[in-house]
């Protein structure tokens, strides 16, 4: 019986040692699977970031296209640097769609009616020239001046005058 117990203990010890050992291939397979999952997750995250950036850009362009008014300083037909991107987006839209636009020039009430008509026209032509620079065909652009005759704000304050010194982009 003593011999049986020793044999049994030796068998249990051998089984315990065999059970504790691991093989390298199983460990490598697990690591490769984890690495592949991490790669797939990283690709999915990169794709999601790219789609989010594209959607944000589409929304930004849509917001710019909703703004169809360019404002000017007093007695000036110079386009402000802050409006360059707005006009570039409109120009690309005109090119992509083949639409035509009417550029309506306006002035505030100060100055003679004749002078304000000329100033409104110069402002509209300034916008037209920039759009042509961005690639819009001259045949897609019509320039009209209303001078002081069609104010956006009928007030007689600096704020009202600022709102009236403008070119409106009207799509046809």
Image (cartoon, rainbow, N blue to C red):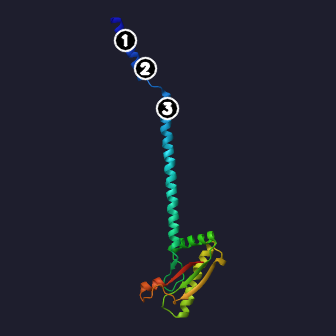
Could you say where residue 132 lies in the image, as x and y percent from the top left? 63, 75
Assess whether mark 1 and mark 2 are in contact (beta carbons under 8 angstroms).
no
Front tag of 3 and 2:
2
Q: Is residue 155 above or below residue 6?
A: below
Residue 96: quarter of image? bottom right
Q: Residues within 10 Å of mark 1 (few under 14, many from 20)?
A: few
- In the picture of the structure, the residue carrying the numbered disc 2 is 18
User: Helix, strand, or loop for circle 2?
Assistant: helix
Q: CA distance from mark 3 to mark 2?
A: 20 Å
Identify the mark nearer the N-term, 3 or 1.
1
SS type, badge 3:
helix
- Residue under the point 36% across and 7% down: 4
Q: Dot 3, how many residues are within 10 Å of its Cα: few (below 14), some (14-19), or many (20+)?
A: few
Dot 2 or dot 1, earlier in sequence: 1
Percent coordinates x, y for residue 92 in the rendering: 60, 69
In the picture of the structure, the residue carrying the numbered disc 3 is 28
Residue drawn where x is 50% and y is 84% of the image: 165
Residue at the spot 54% in from the left edge and 80% down from the top edge:
168
From the viewer's perspective, is 16 left or right of 82? Answer: left
Could you give the CA–CA distance between mark 2 and mark 1, rounded to whole angstroms?
15 Å
Above or below, 35 against 57 in this view is above
Query: Quadrant location of residue 98?
Result: bottom right
Q: CA distance from mark 3 to mark 1?
A: 35 Å
**The N terminus lies in quadrant:** top left
Earlier in the chain: of badge 3 and badge 2, it is 2
Residue pointed to by mark 1? 8
Residue 148: x percent and y percent?
51, 89
């Amino acid at each position: 019986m003593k011999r049986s117990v020793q044999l049994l203990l030796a068998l249990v010890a051998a089984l315990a040692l065999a059970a504790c050992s691991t093989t390298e291939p199983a460990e490598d397979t697990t690591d490769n699977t984890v690495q592949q999952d991490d790669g797939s997750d990283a690709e999915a995250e990169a794709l999601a970031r790219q789609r989010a950036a594209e959607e944000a850009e589409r929304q930004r362009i849509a917001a710019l296209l909703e703004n169809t008014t360019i404002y000017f300083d007093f007695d000036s037909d110079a386009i402000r640097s802050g409006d360059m991107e707005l006009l570039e987006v409109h120009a690309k839209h005109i090119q992509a769609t083949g639409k035509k636009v009417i550029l309506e020039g306006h002035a505030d009430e100060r100055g003679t009616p004749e002078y304000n008509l000329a100033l409104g026209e110069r402002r509209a032509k300034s916008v037209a020239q920039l759009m042509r620079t961005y690639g819009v065909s001259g045949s897609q652009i019509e320039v009209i001046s209303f001078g002081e005759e069609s104010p956006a704000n009928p007030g007689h304050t600096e704020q009202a005058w600022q709102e009236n010194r403008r070119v409106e982009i009207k799509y046809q």
